[in-house]
Image (cartoon, grey):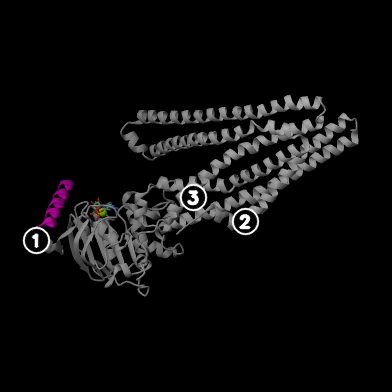
């Protein structure tokens, strides 16, 4: 169980927090001294005791106090806010580590945007509760108690009690407005992210927009979104605009009382003029802690809610992990694969995707799967890689139940070119050497040659250092597929799975690649998944899948003789080819 708690945070860094609060207290004490100096000064001026030397002494004193305040303020920021930043960093690292451990299934069920929001908003809320929240709370308590004590003990208890009456309203207002403003602020954020999403999507899809002549409509859509963003912002401005005058109103009421009651007391000589000046100055100091108390309650509430959400995420266990009966001695694979009456549904789905599938692939064979879209080909690949769990005793690698083989063994000894291949926004070389960034350039080049993409890469001025993605070049579909293939080949895997990985490559290049593969994979197992018969016709064995079941198997010739689905597919593709060549 992952249980992060505020108590745990504070205990872990208790020294830094305690020191931070000490610095904070020193700032407060220094601030509280200033009105005392003012009072002394006023009373002495009134008594005609102030000359030039005394003026300089007072000024020097105030400068000294101000300097001390600045110094200790720097320190508490470093100790408290700095510690909160440390917490933030640790939390974010933990969260990212956790995300990396989770199974693909988790990411399929969560929206990327939501995950990003947890990593930003929730962690920010926790940081604010453990940084500024702590400061405000400590400050509010220290300042309020100290100020009120000074007022009562050194000036006048009756005046103090009456003057304080309006102040709790400030706390209430800041509590309530804190909530309102937070809600509106969230709306502003939403509106803005909506706006930037729209723009971003439009830029990425600009070719589609132009091709369909939708520019005007897109401009309108943007304007609607932008208008919404504007309205939300004005809404927020209005709330702030109301908040400040309200606070000022109540602190003004306090001052009114002091001027009315306190003024009379000075005339009646119940308090001195200096007392009066000090009182006003102390009262001014109370507005902030009163406001802070309201904010603090909000910060802590939000922080707790975020912490709970984060704990829930961190409690999420990966679906796929090494079971207790994992046999860690298995650290190599020969590449024999056996499906034994395997039936499979995706987690939390009702549809049975694979139905009692049985087959055996000998190590070193090249085997192909073909079948209509949605027939379950990619699912078979995902199960062999254990990206999803399969039932016990239904899938064996080298005769071991896949559920007993360490995940690391499976992942290190297999290579997969997924159907929706993904390249990172870095250089082509680094993409190919993804499994080991230290790989020798010669090996990278060799893999590129094997995947028949070497010449394409060399045509770029930067060669293997060409950067891909947003800030770099865009590869054609076929080039992308071949770079992804090179990334798989460089691993020299025991089991290589190509999921429709040559679909965007022309048939001649495909033939070259398949010839290369034959040599590289001579003693290794290769699984080809394809829609095109040309890709797979030389495979040792071909399985035809339909609706989750294997309905035919054999080599190309025997399948043709069979005159089943494979034969139909073949005839259709022959016809298409003829039409194309006309
Ligand atoms: P294609 O030729 O289009 O790639 P395929 O034969 O590879 O198709 P699969 O991707 O294995 O088909 O999908 C088989 C069935 O499983 C489909 O009905 C699909 O909707 C479903 N399916 C695939 N992936 C998932 C998933 N991650 N979660 C839930 N259902 C899925
Ligand atoms: Mg597929």
| Residue behind label 2 places its C-beta within 8 angstroms of ligand 1 | no
List the residue tagged with mark 2.
Answer: 14
Q: Position of residue 56 (x, y in %)?
A: 86, 37
Magenta range: 564-582
Question: Splitting the image into four quadrants, where does ligand 2 fall?
Answer: bottom left
The mark that comes first in sequence, 2 or 1, is: 2
List the residue tagged with mark 1.
Answer: 562
Dominant secondary structure of the residues highlighted in magenta in the image: helix
| Residue behind label 1 places its C-beta within 8 angstroms of ligand 1 | no
Residue 508, quarter of picture: bottom left
List the residue tagged with mark 3.
Answer: 307
152 relative to 552, above or below: above
For mark 3, give the secondary structure.
Answer: helix
Q: Position of residue 177 (x, y in %)?
A: 54, 33
Closer to the camera: disc 2 or disc 1?
2
What is the crowding at mark 3: few (fewer than 14 residues within 10 Å), some, or many (at least 20)?
many
What is the crowding at mark 2: few (fewer than 14 residues within 10 Å), some, or many (at least 20)?
few
For mark 2, give the secondary structure.
Answer: helix
**Most foreground residue, 490 or 272:** 272
What is the crowding at mark 1: few (fewer than 14 residues within 10 Å), some, or many (at least 20)?
some
């Amino acid at each position: 169980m992952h249980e992060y708690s505020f108590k745990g945070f504070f205990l872990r860094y208790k020294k830094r927090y305690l020191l931070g609060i000490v610095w904070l207290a020193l700032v407060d004490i220094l601030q509280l001294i200033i009105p005392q100096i003012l009072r002394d000064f006023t009373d002495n001026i009134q008594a005609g005791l102030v000359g030039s030397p005394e003026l300089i002494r007072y000024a020097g004193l105030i400068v000294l106090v101000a300097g001390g305040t600045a110094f200790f303020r720097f320190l508490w920021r470093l100790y408290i806010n700095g510690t909160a930043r440390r917490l933030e960093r640790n939390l974010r690292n933990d969260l990212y580590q956790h995300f990396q451990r989770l199974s693909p299934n988790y990411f399929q069920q969560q929206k990327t945007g939501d995950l990003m929001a947890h990593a930003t908003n929730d962690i920010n809320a926790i940081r604010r509760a453990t940084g500024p929240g702590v400061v405000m709370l400590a400050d509010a308590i220290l300042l309020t108690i100290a100020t009120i004590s000074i007022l009562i003990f050194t000036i006048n208890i009756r005046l103090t009690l009456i003057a304080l009456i309006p102040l709790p309203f400030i706390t209430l207002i800041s509590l309530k407005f804190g909530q309102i403003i937070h809600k509106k602020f969230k709306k502003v954020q939403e509106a803005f992210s909506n706006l930037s999403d729209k723009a971003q999507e439009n830029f990425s899809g600009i070719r589609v927009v132009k091709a369909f002549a939708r520019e005007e409509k897109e401009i309108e859509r943007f304007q609607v979104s932008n208008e919404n963003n504007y309205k939300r912002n004005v809404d927020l401005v209005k709330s702030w605009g109301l908040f400040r005058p309200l606070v000022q109103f109540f602190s003004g009421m306090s001052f009114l009382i002091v001027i009315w009651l306190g003024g009379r007391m000075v005339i009646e000589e119940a308090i001195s003029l200096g007392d009066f000046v000090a009182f006003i100055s102390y009262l001014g100091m109370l507005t902030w802690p009163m406001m802070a108390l309201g904010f603090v309650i909000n910060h802590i509430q939000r922080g707790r809610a975020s912490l709970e959400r984060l704990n829930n995420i961190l409690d999420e266990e990966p679906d796929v992990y090494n079971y207790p009966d994992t046999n860690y001695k298995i650290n190599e694979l020969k590449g024999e694969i056996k499906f034994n009456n395997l039936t499979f549904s995706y987690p939390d789905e009702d549809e049975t995707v694979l139905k009692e599938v049985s087959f055996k692939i000998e190590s070193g064979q090249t085997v192909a799967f073909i079948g209509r879209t949605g027939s379950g080909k990619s699912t078979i690949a995902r199960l062999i890689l254990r990206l999803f769990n399969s039932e016990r005793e239904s899938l064996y690698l080298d005769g071991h139940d896949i559920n007993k083989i360490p995940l690391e063994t499976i992942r290190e000894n297999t290579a997969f070119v997924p159907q929706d291949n993904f390249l990172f926004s870095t250089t082509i070389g680094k993409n190919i050497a993804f499994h080991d960034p230290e790989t020798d350039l010669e090996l990278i080049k060799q893999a590129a040659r094997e995947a028949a993409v070497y010449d394409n890469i060399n045509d770029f001025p930067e060669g293997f250092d060409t950067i891909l993605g947003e800030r770099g070049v865009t590869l054609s579909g076929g080039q992308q597929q071949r770079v992804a293939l090179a990334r798989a080949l460089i691993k020299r895997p025991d089991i290589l799975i190509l999921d429709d990985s040559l679909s965007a490559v022309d048939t001649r290049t495909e033939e070259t690649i398949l010839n290369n593969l034959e040599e590289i994979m001579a003693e290794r197992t290769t699984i080809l998944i394809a829609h095109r018969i040309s890709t797979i016709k030389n495979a040792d064995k071909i399985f035809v899948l339909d609706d989750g079941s294997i309905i035919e198997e054999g080599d190309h010739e025997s399948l043709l003789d069979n005159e089943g689905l494979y034969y139909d597919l073949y005839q259709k593709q022959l016809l298409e080819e003829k039409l194309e060549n006309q």
